[in-house]
Image: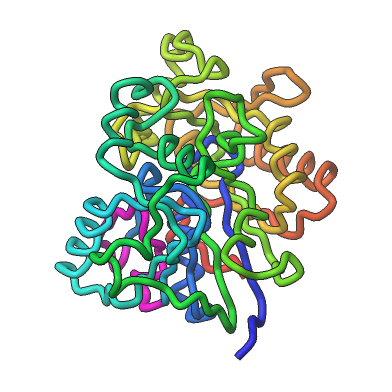
């Protein structure tokens, strides 16, 4: 059976854009035979609600929640202890973890990688998970791959893809190693073309789902998100109303008003065809509606006026964009396809 099509879900900001919820929403419709991660490790985090119950994953793709084969690709990095901790937690909740497979060529994060990371970079440009050190050793041709680990033999993937495939991104566009605010970036590519590392040509890609919030958030250090943002009372209200704390680290995220210029650039470079803009209800709750466009801060009297203008700007600027979806709750979005 050949590959029919590939759809890709990616983040358009700095991560934490509800990619996991969008992927889960797409996967539960039964349209895909595979859900695949293409980069990153357990430094990522997705929160998904299934029948009203909240679950968290860090490395395992969200297809697991709906009985879909869930693949950890060759450009991912795997910390074995964290992987099995996640597997056991999912088993305990009744999910079929035999659906989870790891590419034999995925690289292994060692305890030495984590120790080095925590000693040098944590809280600055890293989550302290050993991600960058693992990628460094991979590209230095001295890494350890999954197929060399006996403990993973039952989870090794045979490399075959067929039917409809959904690819699940980690982090966001502005954390990409090439396009982000270097060195305040992740250690892999977060852009949709990175999904081709799973073993299919780019011509297979049909829809690219880009995820954004109606405001910007950033976990970790970045001069683009200075500490002075924490002095803004309205932005502090956004943090509390939006529960802006990292899934993996628990760290408070810094918040700023949506930068539409950066969003447009991310949409164009990723080739996003469907954009899902979430958490509009957060601004409604605090009754403040602002965004940056053309390097100026614009203020609106209602969320509807802000959304109308934002949609106009995006459609005018992004010719490949087919659909714009605003959502209070991604879990309830039914018109993603």
Quarter of the figure with the C terminus = bottom right
- The residue shown at (78%, 23%) is 294
Q: Could you tell me residue 313's position as x and y percent?
A: 78, 39
Query: Between residues 315 and 264, which one lies in front from this camera angle?
Result: 264
Instruction: Pick out the residue farthest to the front.
Output: 142
Q: Is residue 39 left or right of residue 237?
A: right
Q: Could you tell me residue 18's position as x and y percent?
A: 47, 49
Q: Which residues are magenta?
A: 50-68
- The residue shown at (60%, 59%) is 195
> In the rendered view, would you say 104 is above or below 192?
below
Colouring method of the image: rainbow
Whether 225 is among the magenta residues is no
Instruction: Pick out the residue farthest to the bottom.
Output: 1
Q: Answer with the quarter of the image where residue 155 lies.
A: bottom left
Query: Between residues 1 and 262, which one lies in front from this camera angle?
Result: 1
Q: Is residue 162 left or right of residue 82?
A: right
- The residue shown at (48%, 14%) is 229
Q: Could you tell me residue 5's position as x and y percent?
A: 66, 76
> In the rendered view, would you say 297 is above or below 98?
above
């Amino acid at each position: 059976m050949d590959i029919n099509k590939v759809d890709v879900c990616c983040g358009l900001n700095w991560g934490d854009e509800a990619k996991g919820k969008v992927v889960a929403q797409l996967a539960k419709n039964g349209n895909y035979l595979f859900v695949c991660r293409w980069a990153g490790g357990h430094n990522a985090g997705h929160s998904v609600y299934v029948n009203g119950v909240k679950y968290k994953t860090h490395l395992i793709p969200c297809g697991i929640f709906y009985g879909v084969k869930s693949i950890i690709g060759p450009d991912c990095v795997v910390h074995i202890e964290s992987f099995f901790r996640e597997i056991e937690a999912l088993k305990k909740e009744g999910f079929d973890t035999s659906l989870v497979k790891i590419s034999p060529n995925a690289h292994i994060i060692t305890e030495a990688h984590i120790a080095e990371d925590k000693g040098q970079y944590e809280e600055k440009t890293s989550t302290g998970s050993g991600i960058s050190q693992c990628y460094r050793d991979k590209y230095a041709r001295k890494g350890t791959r999954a197929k060399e680990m006996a403990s993973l033999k039952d989870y090794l993937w045979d490399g075959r893809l067929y039917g409809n495939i959904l690819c699940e991104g980690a982090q966001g566009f502005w954390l990409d190693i090439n396009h982000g605010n270097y060195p305040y970036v992740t250690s892999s590519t977060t852009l949709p073309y990175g999904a081709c590392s799973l073993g299919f040509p780019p011509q297979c890609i049909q829809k690219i789902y880009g995820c954004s919030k109606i405001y910007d958030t950033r976990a970790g250090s970045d001069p683009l998100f200075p500490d002075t943002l924490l002095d803004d009372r309205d932005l502090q209200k956004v943090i509390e109303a939006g529960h802006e704390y990292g899934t993996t680290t628990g760290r408070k995220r810094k918040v700023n008003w949506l930068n539409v210029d950066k969003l447009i650039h991310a949409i164009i470079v990723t080739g996003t065809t469907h954009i899902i803009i979430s958490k509009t209800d957060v601004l409604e709750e605090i009754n403040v509606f602002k965004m940056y466009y053309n390097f100026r801060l614009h203020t609106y009297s209602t969320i509807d006026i802000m959304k109308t203008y934002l949609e106009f700007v995006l459609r005018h600027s992004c010719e490949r964009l087919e659909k714009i979806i605003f959502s209070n709750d991604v879990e309830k979005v039914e018109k993603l396809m």
